[in-house]
Amino acid sequence: MPVSESDTAPTPRSGLGPALLWACFLGCSWTWVIGMFLPIMLVRDFGVWGWIVFATPNVIGAAAMGTVLKSPRVSWELTQKHAWALRWFAGVTIAYQVYVVFWLFNGLWLALIWVLPWLVMDRQRRERVGSWLPAVSVGVAILSWGCFSMAGRLDGAWLDVDTDVLPSRLADLDLWLLAPGLVVGFFLCPYLDPTFHRARYSTGSGTGRVAFALGFGVVFCSMIVFTLMYAGLFRPLVNGNAEFELASSWTAILAIHIGVQVAFTLLVHSRERFAVVEKTDRWPFFWFAGLMLAALAWAVLSRQSGWTLPTADGGSLTLGEVGYRLFLLIYGVFFPGYVLICMIPSLRPGISMASRRKVFWVSCAVAYPLAIMGFIVGPSWWLLGLYGTLGVGRIVADCLPSADPPPREV
C-alpha cells in the first residue's frame, strides 16, 4: 500500500504571510503545459471564447478546493487514503512537461529537466528543498509578472484576441460539446494534485481558503491571461511550422516565463512523486521511467517525422499535437474518473475501494477511446459517450454490494 514517508501532517500555519506564500506556490504549481499551451489551441479552434470556457472552470474549480476541504486534516487523510492515485498524478504531470518541452523546444538547457528531479529524490535533500519552495514561488511569480509587463509593449501582443485575425477552425457547437469535459476535469482533477494537498494541510482552515482564492483567482489567472497575450505568436509553432522564429525580445521574455514555470512545476511534482513510497512494490520507478521514455520517444518522433493526422472537419493535426492531446485526455478521463468513482463518498457505505477501482478501470477503458474520437479525430459528438460512460461508472459503483453486509435476521 502506498503511504507518505511521514505518518503525521505538518503543523498548519495561519496568517496573512503564509496565505500569500502558499497562494504564489499554488498559482505557480498549476501553471504548467496545460495553462501555457492549451489556450493557444483553443483560441485557434474557437476564438477568444475558447479561452473563456477554458479559464472559468479552471480558476473556479481549483480555488474551490480550499473551501471544499474544510480543514487540513481532511486533506491529509485524503493523501494517505489515495496516495497511489496522487503518485500517478505527479508522475504523469512530470512526463507531460518533459514531452511538451522536447516537442516544441531544443537547446542544452533541456538538461535541467533531469537535474531538477534529482534534487528531490533523496529524502534529506527533499526536506531541505521543500522548506523554501513557497518562498521560491514568490520569485517565480514576480519573474513571470515582469515578463508579462514587458511583453505588453511589444508588437504581436494580443494578436489572436481580435476574432477577425483568425477564423475559428471548429464550430461553436464543438466548443459547447467540449465545455462539460473542461468543467468536470478542472473541478475534479485538483483533488489528485499532491501539491494542492501540500498547501491545504500546511495552512489553517481560514488561511487555506484565502491562499486558494488568491492563488487561482489572482496568481494563476494572471498567468493564463499572459498565455492569451502570446497565443497568436506561438500558434505557428504549435501548428508545426518548421520555419517558426520569434523576435529576439519575445524569445527572451517567453524563455524566462515558460522556463521558470516548467522548472518549478517539475521541482514541486518531483518532490511529491518521490515522497510517496510503495512498500509492496520492488520496482517503484520502473513504470515512471517507462512513461518518461515513451514521452521522449513520441516527442522526438514528432519533431522528425512531419506526420499529420486527418480529422473529421477536413483539417489535420500534427503528430506533436496528437501526443499533447493524448496526454491531456488523461486529465479528462482517468483522473476525474478516479475522483468521481473512487474519491467522492458513496451513497451506500461499506463498498470496498477495490471494487470501486475495478469499476473505475473498466469505465476508463471504455471512455478513453471515446475521448480520443471526440477530442482528436472528431466529430465532437463522441464526447457525449465519454460523459455518459463516466456517469454510468459512478452509478454502478454506488450500486455495488457492501463489503460488510448486515447480518440476516433469524
Image (cartoon, rainbow, N blue to C red):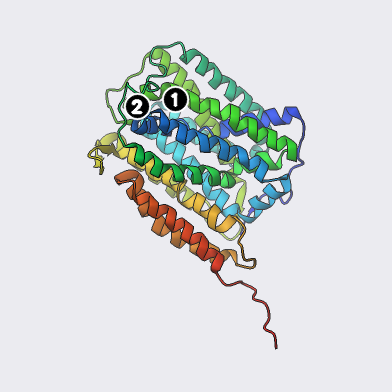
User: Relative to residue 101, is residue 22 drawn left or right?
Assistant: right
In the picture as drawn, the residue positioned furthest to the bottom comes out as 410
Mark 1 lies on residue: 228
> Helix, strand, or loop for circle 2?
helix
**Residue at image x 64%, y 35%?**
212
The picture places residue 18, in percent across and down from the top left corner, at 72, 31
In this rendering, is residue 286 above or below 133? below
Few, some or many C-alpha atoms within 10 Å of disc 2 (few <14, some 14-19, many ≥20)?
some
Q: Is residue 382 visible?
A: yes
Q: Amino acid at mark 2?
A: Arg
Few, some or many C-alpha atoms within 10 Å of disc 1 (few <14, some 14-19, many ≥20)?
many
The picture places residue 241, in percent across and down from the top left corner, at 28, 27
**Residue at image x 68%, y 81%?**
407
- In the depicted view, which residue is nearer to us: 379 or 119? 379
In the picture, residue 168 is in which quadrant?
top left
- Of the image marks 1 and 2, the number of the one nearer the N terminus: 1
**Residue at image x 67%, y 49%?**
5
The picture places residue 180, in percent across and down from the top left corner, at 45, 45
User: Relative to residue 335, is residue 169 drawn left or right?
Assistant: left
In the rendered view of the protein, which quadrant contains the C terminus?
A: bottom right
In this rendering, is residue 308 above or below 167? below
Mark 2 lies on residue: 235
Q: Amino acid at mark 1?
A: Leu
